[in-house]
């Protein structure tokens, strides 16, 4: 695969050492190129890349409120269209909080109206920017500051909300899941999303050293473990056709993924077994 | 040009902030061992390894992902 050299996210940003979000954005922007306008919801990405009066973005970028990345991206797309600038790509980046919870209605509207835009959710599975509060995308069992483990609780007690499937239910032409640990797979999906006419949604799984509790050097390793254990699946849905894009040769037990992170350290065997059973069930259905 | 809200007119101006000062461990790449796999370039959160595998220490925060992901262990982390 030919990977463009040019970078559109400048260094000097304030991301934690070992940040997964910036890796994802760098890779996406390489594929999207300079003829792109980006929109970001409130979240880590906005805070780390634009400490006023500086910006890390080398392309036009707009920060909007937590809930309206989908709406503003729609407006930008229509404005460009009205000006006859059909060759400009519009991309929205939002975290899992800005996607699964706060921004869900404006995203749903954008998908429904059929705007020609790409929406990339960088999913670190909690509100990391404000201090690790749970989001709809926090997985079962994870300890966060608002789903803490202790005598009364074993951590998050709800399953992870399945946003890519909610997006697929809108009948949009392209929906995909990806992981920063599989860059070629991710970048191919970004390229496809760029070429497709109409809305495209990519859900990017992205480990977070601060919120998940692991050494910064292990960011890529954690993302890989999520996929190799079947805890995160890589697929795409193109014009309604579902396709798994990566199958682990041999699926590892979820324990190796869970035990590598502080947020799952407290889990008792029975909870881990429950998670394993759930993963087994999903993977059996998809023959992974 | 009228500005609405807070506008930053200089693209990529965060380069003024040299994050290399955050670093405790410094990645040292042995170019003799390097097999040009681009792993470290792709996985660097700062994007501060160029195509010739030169690491820009002005920005490297020392996370160690490059050393961890190097398949031939050409990168060693050394204490500053």
Image: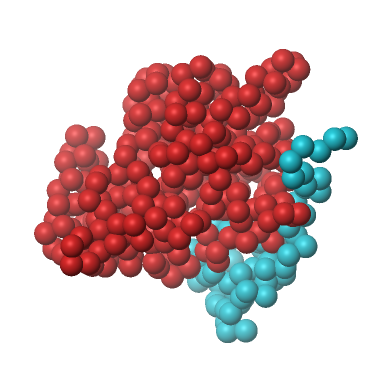
What residue appears at the point 50 percent right and 56 percent down from the top-left corner?
A129
Q: Quadrant of residue A255?
A: bottom left
Point out the residue furthest to the right here. B1
- Find residue A151 and report its horizontal and vertical position in percent: 18, 67
Work out which quarter of the rendered image holds the C terminus of chain A and state it.
top left
Taking depth in this image into account, of A253 and A72 the one nearest to the observer is: A72
Q: Is residue A162 above or below residue A258?
A: above
- Find residue B12 and report its horizontal and vertical position in percent: 75, 51
Taking depth in this image into account, of A75 and A184 the one nearest to the observer is: A75
Point out the residue furthest to the bottom here. B79
Q: Is residue A56 above or below residue B7?
A: below
Q: Is residue A13 above or below residue A217?
A: above
What residue appears at the point 36 percent right and 61 percent down from the top-left corner?
A145
- In the figure, the shade used to draw chain A is red
Q: Quadrant of residue B9?
A: top right
Q: Quick check: A151 left or right of A34?
A: left
Chain the render paints cyan: B
Does the rendering let one see residue A227?
Answer: no
- Find residue B5 and report its horizontal and vertical position in percent: 74, 41
């Amino acid at each position: 695969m030919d990977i463009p050299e040019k970078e559109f996210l400048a260094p000097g940003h304030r991301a934690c050492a070992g940040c997964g979000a910036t890796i994802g954005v760098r890779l996406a922007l390489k594929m999207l190129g300079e003829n792109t306008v980006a929109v970001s919801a409130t979240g880590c990405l906005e805070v780390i890349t634009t400490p006023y009066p500086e910006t890390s973005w080398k392309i036009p970028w707009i920060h909007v409120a937590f809930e309206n990345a989908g709406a503003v991206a729609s407006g930008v797309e229509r404005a460009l269209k009205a000006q006859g600038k059909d060759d400009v790509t519009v991309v929205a980046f939002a975290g899992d909080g800005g996607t699964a919870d706060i921004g869900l209605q404006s995203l749903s509207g954008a998908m429904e109206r059929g705007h020609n835009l790409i929406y990339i959710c960088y999913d670190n599975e909690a509100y990391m920017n404000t201090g690790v509060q749970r989001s709809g995308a926090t997985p079962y069992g994870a300890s966060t500051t608002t789903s803490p483990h202790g005598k009364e609780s074993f951590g998050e007690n709800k399953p992870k909300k399945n946003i890519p499937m909610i997006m697929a239910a809108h009948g949009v032409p392209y929906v995909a899941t990806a992981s920063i640990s599989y860059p070629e797979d991710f970048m191919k999906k970004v390229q496809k999303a760029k070429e497709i006419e109409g809305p495209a949604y990519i859900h990017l799984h992205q480990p977070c050293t601060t919120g998940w509790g692991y050494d910064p050097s292990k960011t890529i390793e954690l993302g890989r473990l999520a996929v190799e254990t079947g805890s995160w699946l890589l697929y795409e849905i193109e014009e309604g056709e579902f396709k798994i894009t990566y199958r682990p040769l041999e699926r590892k037990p979820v324990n190796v993924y869970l035990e590598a992170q502080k947020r799952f350290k407290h889990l008792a065997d029975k909870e881990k077994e429950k998670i394993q059973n759930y993963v087994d069930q999903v993977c059996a259905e998809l023959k992974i | 040009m009228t500005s609405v809200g807070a506008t930053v007119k200089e693209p990529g101006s965060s380069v003024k902030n040299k994050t290399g000062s955050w670093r405790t461990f410094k990645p040292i790449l042995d170019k003799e061992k390097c097999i040009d796999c681009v792993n470290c370039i792709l996985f660097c959160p700062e994007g501060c390894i160029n195509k010739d595998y030169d690491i820009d220490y002005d920005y490297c925060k020392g996370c160690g992902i490059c050393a961890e992901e190097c398949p031939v262990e050409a990168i060693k982390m050394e204490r500053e």
